Image (cartoon, rainbow, N blue to C red):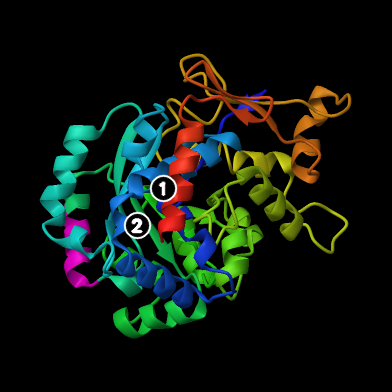
Amino acid sequence: LLPGFVNSHVHLGESVYFPFINKKLSLSGYLERTEELYVSNEEIGKKRDLVCKFSLYQLIRNGVTAIGGGRVTETATEFQIPNTSGYMLMNSAKLGHFSSNAHDNFLKTKNEEDNILNRHCIFIHSLSRIGKDEIDVVKKLKHELHDLMVMIHVEEDESESNIVREKWGSSSIQVLENEGILDSKTFLIHGNYLSDSDLDIIANSGATICHCVTSNLTVADRVLDITKALERKINLVVATDGPITGAGFNILNEVRKVYQYQNRFVDAEKVSPQKCLDMITINPANAIGQSEVSGSIEAGKLANFVIFEPPFEVKPQEIVNMLIRYELIDVFGVVINGERVVWDRNLIVEDWEKTRLAFSSLIESI
């Protein structure tokens, strides 16, 4: 029995694109393709709630009991899952309307919906896809709300990194620092092109870096070497990203890939199994402001945990090593708020089959 996993960066609404992206794309190619699909079929926008619910069920099946991402509160509330939901700022057909009156709209959402389970933050897609007006809104909100969390994709691939430098005159990290946005409440996603000086600035700020290794192997052109972040004692978390770029919903397999990638070609472990487990439990719970209720099993927190049934006898002190190093053990059960929602590796929620069939019908209609 272990704490429920915290998937601190996931795009719930992207499962709908599974059948329609069947070749390897760059980051810009992926964004262009999904935007094209969204614009060409209004059902995708109309039925986002269904797509998000389908995605959440898949995450739960794989042991996730708390999430962070863009626009996740409505879906998470149905299961009373702790969540940190990003108010999206991005110049796009799908999300551009959120920039209109963003200051007042964000405050209204935060005031109406923030509680012990639901937190709201600003989610800047990236500095390459917003302008000075959006930055000014974020700065104003940071001044008014001293606990405001900001999520942002940074330095994901070479093209995005170059666009930011051409547009803003320096790296994403330097821009965020200069604008007064970078601090311990900042959640930096990807960071594949972070320089040593960027990492030093991040370490001094107390910001978190979110590592999505599968996504970066899929659509980016470099993968973050997390040992540099760990050397600087930067809070590091692992997440699946979107199901298309991240190849699915299994955060345990994601952190196993991190373990394998970081410890490749050497005799000694650079990153231990326990450190990897921390990257999907207590570290992200702290990073997205959900540590009061998630991230560990202790009195006063929610009864959210995952259950494993090893195929052979394993000493308790060895279970974490076995879980992270090998793919022999998968999630047997998931408990959320003291209620079983997965048992014997199957979802046991009432409307799972209805949701699955409705999702299939949506895909067929597209």
The answer to which of 175 and 276 lies nearer the viewer is: 276
Mark with earlier residue (2, 1): 2
Amino acid under label 1? Answer: Val
Left or right relative to 242: residue 177: left
| Image quarter in which the C terminus is found | bottom left
Residue 132 located within the stretch drawn in magenta: yes
Label 2 element class: helix
Residue 281 located within the stretch drawn in magenta: no
The residue carrying pointer 2 sits among few (fewer than 14), some (14 to 19) or many (20 or more) residues within 10 Å by Cα, namely many
Label 1 element class: helix
Q: Residue at x 20, y 44 (%)?
A: 145
Q: Position of residue 121 (x, y in %)?
A: 30, 46
Q: Residue furthest bottom?
A: 166
Q: Which range of residues does the magenta coloring cover?
A: 131-140
Q: Position of residue 209 (x, y in %)?
A: 50, 55
Q: CA distance from mark 2 to mark 1?
A: 8 Å
Amino acid under label 2? Answer: Ile
Total numbered circles: 2
Above or below for 350 versus 12: above
Q: Residue at x 59, y 74 (%)?
A: 24
The residue carrying pointer 1 sits among few (fewer than 14), some (14 to 19) or many (20 or more) residues within 10 Å by Cα, namely many
Q: Residue at label 1?
A: 51
Q: Residue at label 2?
A: 44
